[in-house]
Image (cartoon, rainbow, N blue to C red):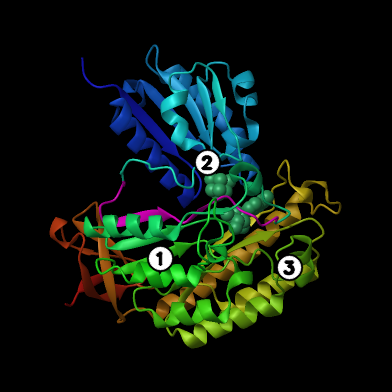
Amino acid sequence: MGAKKFYIETLGCAMNVRDSEHMVAELTQKEGYEPTDTLEEADLILINTCSVREKPVHKLFSEIGVFNKRKKEGAKIGVCGCTASHLGEEIIRRAPFVDFVLGARNVSKITQVLHKPKAVEVDIDYDESQYAFGEFRASPYKAYVNISIGCDKQCTFCIVPHTRGEEISIPAELIVREAKRAAESGAKEIFLLGQNVNNYGRRFSGEHPKTTFTDLLKMVSEIEAVERIRFTSPHPLHMDDAFLEEFARNPKICKSMHMPLQSGSTRILKAMKRGYTKEWFLERAAKLREMVPGVSISTDIIVAFPGETEEDFEDTMDVLEKVRFEQLFSFKYSPRPLTPAQHYENRVPDDIGSARLKRLQERHGEILDELKAKRVGEVHRVYFEELRPGGMVAGRTDNNMLVSVEGSEELLGRTLSVEITEAGRTAHRGRVVA
Ligand code: 5AD
Ligand code: SF4
């Protein structure tokens, strides 16, 4: 008889991707499982869920129903991640065939719940900030490294503090050790992860010398084998001068910054409890563009937050016009349980929300077309990390543009100069020039 097999589906953000890697490591190294891409072949089916918006949560139950029909006899189904945290045992009530529920920040317990029928482990105070997970990375070229768990912000729209609990920073020496080990085994790009990375050092679970995110960036960049550092997500409120200066000065830090705006209206930002104003955001973005020529700025925007007027929305459009984000992730407000905003009055009608989202996305598409026209002929350093169909290899520029060139395996893991020959809105084609 061959090894037991597991199938895993990962939804949501980079934190979830890393949580899934941790579960893979635990299952393969401690339980003798092997991964499979074929659901029907799996002895264990895991779905690592996201609860940030309502739609995917609705879809969860129909999806696991399908899993249950397709699975082989005796196979177990586990629901993990943020929706597991927030719905807990309700998941087993609504879908009694589910074998266990494992919340975000409890993933180190995967080897326990596996053997406990109908286990529900969703404690959001559980501290796994120093748990020694086994080693597994989906890509040999790029390593996700967690720097904190949880989130202490109380943005009024956001469910995450209720699914991932309070913020605890991982000790800097553990982060540096992990980054060093990953880089020395070939992952030259280190991706630092946390819900609010530039709030790093706010709280550790034991005694720890004061360390800021800026200090941590310096420490990771001192590792010789590390060539590139990326991070997500920073908070605009904590973008102080020291942080921007280190970002600009340090050649190992990739020149792309995520600045989640959420809204361009100071009034709405206040209702969201974001802690900054439209002016603060614009000033920080302008300073960043001035300090770091060629930087790309991405953002998240929510339209139709309760009480958002036409005038508020025009403020968001105005920030879009002024900052000209290289990448936009935009959403219509979705009321979430456990959050203050779900009780706010003055809900924006759905059709108005949809129209605002459309206008925002269309205008952003035009901005991308304007940016794109200038890209052809530019030369960038591209770190190649992925084979693509049709004899292509893809990688990212320092400022996070996706570029593919003709080529094969021998380009993987190398950083080469590439001239952009054809520019698209989200991905470009190029040719290696050195
Ligand atoms: N409704 C819509 N979008 C949301 N986000 C977070 N909560 C909600 C919500 N209730 C968006 C934010 C965040 C991104 C990950 O998801 O823009 O930055
Ligand atoms: Fe989704 Fe937020 Fe949880 Fe990530 S932290 S999986 S975005 S709810």
Going by the picture, which residue comes out furthest to the right? 345
The residue lying at 67 percent from left, 54 percent from top is 332
Q: Nearer the viewer, residue 245 or 267?
A: 245
Q: Look at the picture and state if 147 lies above or below 283.
A: above
Asked whether residue 428 is in view, the answer is no
Going by the picture, which residue comes out furthest to the front? 207
- Name the kind of residue labelled 1 in the image: Arg
**Rendered location of residue 59, percent (x, y):** 57, 34
Quarter of the image with the N terminus is top left
For marks 2 and 3, the one nearer the N-term is: 2
Q: What range is drawn magenta here?
A: 137-154
**Rendered location of residue 34, percent (x, y):** 27, 29
**Rendered location of residue 240, percent (x, y):** 58, 77
Q: Look at the picture and state if 35 lies above or below 413.
A: above
1 and 3 marks in contact (CB < 8 Å):
no
The image quarter in which residue 35 lies: top left
Disc 3: which residue? 313
How far apart are labels 1 and 2 at the CA level?
A: 22 Å
Asked whether residue 331 is in view, the answer is yes
